[in-house]
Amino acid sequence: MRSKLPAAYEPTDDIPESDVGAPPDESGAVDFYTRPGCGFSARLFRGLDHRGIPMRLHDIWSDPEAAATVRAAARGNETVPTIGFGGEFLVNPGVDEVLDLLNRCAPHLVPPEPPRDRGFTNRFRRSGS
């Protein structure tokens, strides 16, 4: 089954080229390079969106500059998803890798992780243990 990016996915064609890979204090969002129909991108997008990470989406099939950026980051390949932030690039990362990058470069962009609901297991704990 082919995954699609959520309906919120809108490629951004109006981002000035000077903002691509801009330092964290200037951009305030990660650059998310993708292409339509990429299941790996859809999965990463959902994970980052769930965590509240700000993203600017770039469609490498409709934006030649974005495609060139990805090729430069991915040793000549157009591998997506590719994440750019503060001059660093991650090729086909997981959510944890992106969060590690942001925690190093711009911790203010990483919202605190919500507490885990342990309701079911807590109901069966014995008192005093």
Image (tube, grey):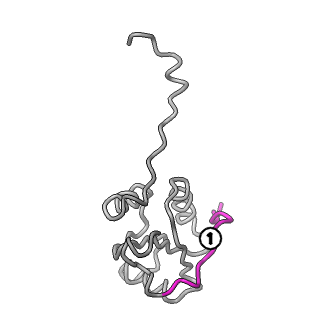
43 and 122: which is toward the camera: 122
The residue lying at 42 percent from left, 63 percent from top is 93
Q: Amino acid at mark 1?
A: Gly
Q: Is residue 116 above or below residue 122?
A: below
Residue 112: x, y in percent?
44, 48
The image quadrant of residue 89 is: bottom left
Q: Furthest residue to the left?
A: 104
Dot 1 falls on a residue whose secondary structure is loop
In the rendered image, residue 68, in percent from the top left (x then y), is placed at 44, 87
Q: Is residue 15 magenta?
A: yes
Range covered by the magenta-colored residues: 1-16
Q: Tell me the quarter of the picture where residue 109 sits.
A: bottom left
Name the image quarter holding the N terminus: bottom right
Q: How many marks?
A: 1
Q: Taken as a whole, is the magenta stretch helix, strand or loop? A: loop
Find disc 1 in the rendering and name its residue.
37
| Residue 97 position in % (x across, y down) | 38, 59
Q: How would you rate the neighbour count of disc 1 (Cα within 10 Å): few for under 14, some for 14-19, many for 20 or more? A: few
Q: Is residue 78 above or below residue 37?
A: below
Q: Depth check: give the residue in front, 29 or 82.
A: 29
Name the residue: 39% across, 78% down.
22
Name the residue: 44% across, 74% down.
27
For the point 50% across and 86% down, the residue is 16
Tell me if residue 9 is in the magenta stretch.
yes
Is the C terminus in the top left, top right, bottom left or bottom right quadrant?
top left
